């Protein structure tokens, strides 16, 4: 059975206080790292980027359609230009010139139709580009919000880590001055139970918050003052205060 002087055991409460602070800082760090705003923004950004990708593909396809439409118009215009040059030269048989006039008239109709298609594609492209720009703005806004919140969280995390570094230093320095055997029992209990030590006050374990049974109190009373005793519910080391076995004044 591990033993330590009562005064030495009392020091465990201060050590536990430092460990409780470190645990609180660890919980704070975890809370900051899993801020739901980040999760929500990441989801929104994923959707917005998907929409932006679709908008870019639509613009790319429309630009390809416009190039084809422009090429079609240019091809017909070149054909009209060549035919008009032949017609204006006046060379050839009369029937050939008449046929050439008809061909030019047909080509002009074809060019008009193609130009209508070109205008429709241009209008569609303008609309799609506007949609892409609007979607890009949504992405930029989300990224801006994300960056702002991330900076806020990083600052808070840095403060938590700085405080934890100070507390860890205090803890290490304080632990170095404790009885080695008692400290080993405490560390093992802390790792296993989550709480290393707590006060036994007016018959109540402050580790579990439960009042000990008469039988458990009798066992602790029978133990030597330098004997390390444990909470029957939480398993933590119970540090007996001066009033540990006296009734609470509120009872």
Image (tube, rainbow, N blue to C red):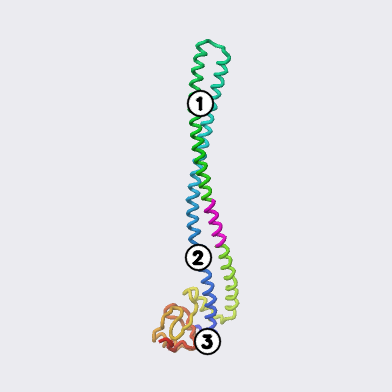
In the depicted structure, whether residue 117 falls above or below residue 100: below
Residue 207 forms part of the magenta stretch: no
Among the two numbered marks 2 and 1 on one chain, the one whose residue lies closer to the N terminus = 2
Residue at the extreme left? 214
Q: Residues within 10 Å of mark 2 (few under 14, many from 20)?
A: few
Distance from Cα at disc 2 to Cα at disc 3: 38 Å
Q: Residues within 10 Å of mark 3 (few under 14, many from 20)?
A: some
Residue 47, position as x, y percentages in the image: 47, 50
Among the two numbered marks 2 and 3 on one chain, the one whose residue lies closer to the N terminus = 3
Q: Which residue is mark 3?
A: 6
Q: Which residue is mark 1?
A: 111
Among the two numbered marks 3 and 1 on one chain, the one whose residue lies closer to the N terminus = 3
Residue 145 forms part of the magenta stretch: yes
Residue drawn 50% across the image and 56% down it? 41
- Circle 1: element type: helix
Distance from Cα at disc 3 to Cα at disc 1: 104 Å
Residue drawn 52% across the image and 41% down it? 129
Residue 251, position as x, y percentages in the image: 40, 87
Q: Nearer the viewer, residue 108 or 203?
A: 108
Distance from Cα at disc 2 to Cα at disc 1: 67 Å
Mark sitting on residue 156: none
Q: Nearer the viewer, residue 142 or 216?
A: 142
In the depicted structure, whether residue 191 falls above or below residue 201: above
**Residue range of the region highlighted in magenta in the rendering:** 140-152
Residue drawn 56% across the image and 80% down it? 180
Residue drawn 55% across the image and 84% down it? 8
Q: Which residue is mark 2?
A: 31
């Amino acid at each position: 059975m591990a033993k330590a002087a009562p005064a030495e055991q009392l020091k465990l409460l201060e050590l536990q206080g430092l460990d409780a602070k470190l645990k609180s800082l660890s919980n704070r760090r975890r809370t900051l790292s899993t801020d739901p705003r980040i999760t929500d923004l990441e989801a929104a950004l994923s959707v917005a980027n998907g929409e932006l990708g679709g908008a870019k593909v639509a613009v790319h396809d429309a630009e390809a359609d416009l190039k084809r439409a422009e090429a079609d118009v240019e091809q017909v215009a070149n054909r009209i230009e060549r035919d008009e040059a032949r017609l204006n030269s006046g060379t050839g048989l009369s029937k050939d010139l008449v046929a050439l006039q008809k061909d030019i008239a047909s080509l002009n109709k074809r060019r008009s139709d193609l130009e209508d298609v070109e205008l429709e594609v241009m209008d569609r492209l303008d609309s799609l580009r506007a949609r892409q720009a609007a979607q890009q703005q949504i992405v930029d806004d989300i990224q801006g919000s994300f960056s702002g919140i991330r900076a806020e969280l990083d600052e808070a995390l840095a403060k938590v880590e700085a405080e934890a570094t100070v507390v860890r230093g205090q803890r290490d320095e304080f632990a170095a001055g404790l009885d080695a055997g008692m400290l080993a029992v405490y560390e093992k209990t802390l790792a296993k139970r989550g709480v290393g030590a707590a006060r036994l006050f007016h018959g109540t374990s402050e580790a579990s918050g439960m009042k000990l049974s008469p039988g458990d109190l009798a066992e602790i009373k029978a133990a030597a003052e330098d004997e390390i005793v444990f909470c029957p519910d939480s398993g933590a080391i119970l540090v007996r205060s001066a009033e540990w076995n006296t009734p609470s004044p509120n009872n």
